[in-house]
Amino acid sequence: MEARRDVFQAIADPTRREIIGMVAKEPQNINALAENFDISRQAVSLHLKILNECGLIIVHKKGRERVCEAKLDQLAEVNQWVKQYKQFWEQKLDALEVYLDSLHKDDKK
Amino acid sequence: MEARRDVFQAIADPTRREIIGMVAKEPQNINALAENFDISRQAVSLHLKILNECGLIIVHKKGRERVCEAKLDQLAEVNQWVKQYKQFWEQKLDALEVYLDSLHKDDKK
DNA sequence: TCCATACGCAAGTATTTGCTTGCAAATATA
DNA sequence: TATATTTGCAAGCAAATACTTGCGTATGGA
């Protein structure tokens, strides 16, 4: 479970995306995080290691605990990459927005 | 090389991101795409298969060629996911955050 | 028709992932 | 001090991933 370590690879795993969501909401120690999953503590710990190594979380010791905290600046890279293709989905979203707006107006009537 | 097939996984691979960049710029057939890489045509073809299966490209026959075209609406999902953490990288120079960061450093002692 | 081109399919391989279990170290609490 | 908690390290494993090579099949042009 070594080798590649970029943000795209890091967020490719659903479990890691969940972890990110959790620590973004509130910093937590490893056991607390692991309780949310069916996999072993070690497995979660490895995911955390990967997230840490590519800079998406920071871990600081607090007694015998390791508190994991979100540090998602790196996601800007993903945002940047996706953004350049915005034209490919933007029109569709606009259309959806218009549609939802029209529903809204109908509601108010 | 089967099994998982979501957008996050699809864009995790650097080669696939390159391919996306190429077909987004201009639709191309498989051999033309493969020439840009050091890997075999088959390898590129497999990447294209994955991209196709998760809907990021569409392939249409044109004589004996298969022309690949970008269809990146699915990237909206990634955009959406990343967007929710925008706060984590956007206000880097915010005075409050700098202050909180300094408190953090104290914590680590 | 004959041949080159563009491509898919399938078998085989090395490496990476994602996970487990067992055990040891460090810290907190009784 | 004895014990429980939180965690890391390491070996081991099945499956997925990223490739390769060889061969067969259309399609297009000479």
Image: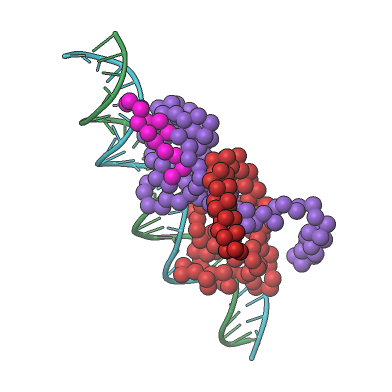
Chain colours: A red, B purple, C cyan, D green
Residue A1 image offset from top left, x and y in percent: 49, 53
Q: Residue at x 54, y 62 (%)?
A: A18
The image shows residue B109, relative to residue A91, as above or below, that is below
Can I make out residue A53 in this image?
no
The image shows residue A102, relative to residue B55, as above or below, that is below
User: Principal SS element in the magenta part?
Assistant: strand
Residue B61 image offset from top left, x and y in percent: 35, 31
The image shows residue B16, relative to residue C25, as above or below, that is above
Please tell me which residue lies in front, A18 or C29.
A18
Horizontally, residue B91 falls left or right of residue C15, namely right
Please tell me which residue lies in front, A61 or B9.
B9
Can I make out residue B53 in this image?
yes
The image shows residue B8, relative to residue B107, as above or below, that is above
Q: Residue at x 55, y 58 (%)?
A: A103
Quadrant assignment, res B46: top left
Q: Residue at x 72, y 52 (%)?
A: B90
Q: Residue at x 41, y 42 (%)?
A: B52
Query: Is residue B60 inside the magenta stretch?
Result: yes
Residue B3 image offset from top left, x and y in percent: 37, 52
Q: Magenta region: which residues?
A: B55-68
User: The C terminus of chain A is located in which quarter?
Assistant: bottom right
Query: Is residue B57 inside the magenta stretch?
Result: yes
Please tell me which residue lies in front, A51 or A64.
A51
Quadrant assignment, res D12: bottom left
Please tell me which residue lies in front, A35 or A49.
A35
Residue A64 image offset from top left, x and y in percent: 65, 73
Callout count: 0
Horizontally, residue D25 falls left or right of residue D13, namely left
